[in-house]
Image: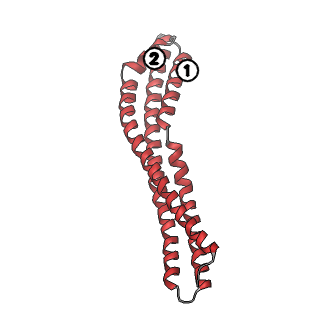
């Protein structure tokens, strides 16, 4: 007995979800690798700039009051945070949504399996294949999401640490300026 058209359509839809998840996986890995490379380069330059001459020059070029130093350094840090965070929204979005896309593929695969089961009594192999395909969709969804979430959290922590170091350096400079202005 031939399968109904809707069962075939659902089967192709499940395969389309798997292909879509594969594409998301490639996108996720490319963002992770790009961020790793960029942050390694930018991070060293940023650490050099907050510990070295660039950041200090920016602070010292401001008028010698704490408000000016706060303003100049905050603008510098906002720009750096934006540069560091490029692509991280992709990882956050994939981490949050890929499991649901995989679950959608699982539901489609189960629908296909039950549809196949309802139209044939001897097609257990087809039913088992549909169920296996459904479970693969869940696994692939998790395969996309887990590295994306881990990478997102890792990069966010690293960025917060760098920005925290820079803010600490700025606060030290502000304290020095405030001490000098009071004649300490």
Tell me where residue 104 appears, x and y as whole percent.
59, 65
Q: Is residue 107 above or below residue 56?
A: below
User: Could you say which is closer to the camera, residue 130 or residue 170?
Assistant: 130
Residue at 51% in and 33% down: 82
Where does the C terminus fall, quadrant-wise?
top left
Category of crowding for the residue at label 2, using alpha-carbon neighbours closer than 10 angstroms: few (below 14), some (14–19), many (at least 20): some
Tell me where residue 137 appears, x and y as whole percent.
51, 66
Tell me where residue 92 appears, x and y as whole percent.
53, 48
Q: Is residue 110 above or below residue 29?
A: below
Q: Which residue is mark 1?
A: 71
- Quote the CA–CA distance across marks 1 and 2: 11 Å
Contact flag, marks 1 and 2 (Cβ < 8 Å): no
Question: Which numbered disc, 1 or 2, marks the residue that appears first in the sequence?
Answer: 2
The label shown at residue 39 is none
Category of crowding for the residue at label 1, using alpha-carbon neighbours closer than 10 angstroms: few (below 14), some (14–19), many (at least 20): few
Tell me where residue 131 appears, x and y as whole percent.
52, 76
Residue that protrudes farthest toward the front in the picture = 2
Q: Which residue is mark 2?
A: 58
Instruction: Give the SS element for disc 1.
Output: helix
User: Could you say which is closer to the camera, residue 153 or residue 121?
Assistant: 121
Q: Is residue 150 visible?
A: no
Q: Is residue 94 above or below residue 50?
A: below
Residue at 58% in and 86% down: 120
Q: Is 95 left or right of 56, judged from the image as shown? A: right
Residue at 50% in and 43% down: 88
User: Could you say which is closer to the camera, residue 14 or residue 75?
Assistant: 14
């Amino acid at each position: 007995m031939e399968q109904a058209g809707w069962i075939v359509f659902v089967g192709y839809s499940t395969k389309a979800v798997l292909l879509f998840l594969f594409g998301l996986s490639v996108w996720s890995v490319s963002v992770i690798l790009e961020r790793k490379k960029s942050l390694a380069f930018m991070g060293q330059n940023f650490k050099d700039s907050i510990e070295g001459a660039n950041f200090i020059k920016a602070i010292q070029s401001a008028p010698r009051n704490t408000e000016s130093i706060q303003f100049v350094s905050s603008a510098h840090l906002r720009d750096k945070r934006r540069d560091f965070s490029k692509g991280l929204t992709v990882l956050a979005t994939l981490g949050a949504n890929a499991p649901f896309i995989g679950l959608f593929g699982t539901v489609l695969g189960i629908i296909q399996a039950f549809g196949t089961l309802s139209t044939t009594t001897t097609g257990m192999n087809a039913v088992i294949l549909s169920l296996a395909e459904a479970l693969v969709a869940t696994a692939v969804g998790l395969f996309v999401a887990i590295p994306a979430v881990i990478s997102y959290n890792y990069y966010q922590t690293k960025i917060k640490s760098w920005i925290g170091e820079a803010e600490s350096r700025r606060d030290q400079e502000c304290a020095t300026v405030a001490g000098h202005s009071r004649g300490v």
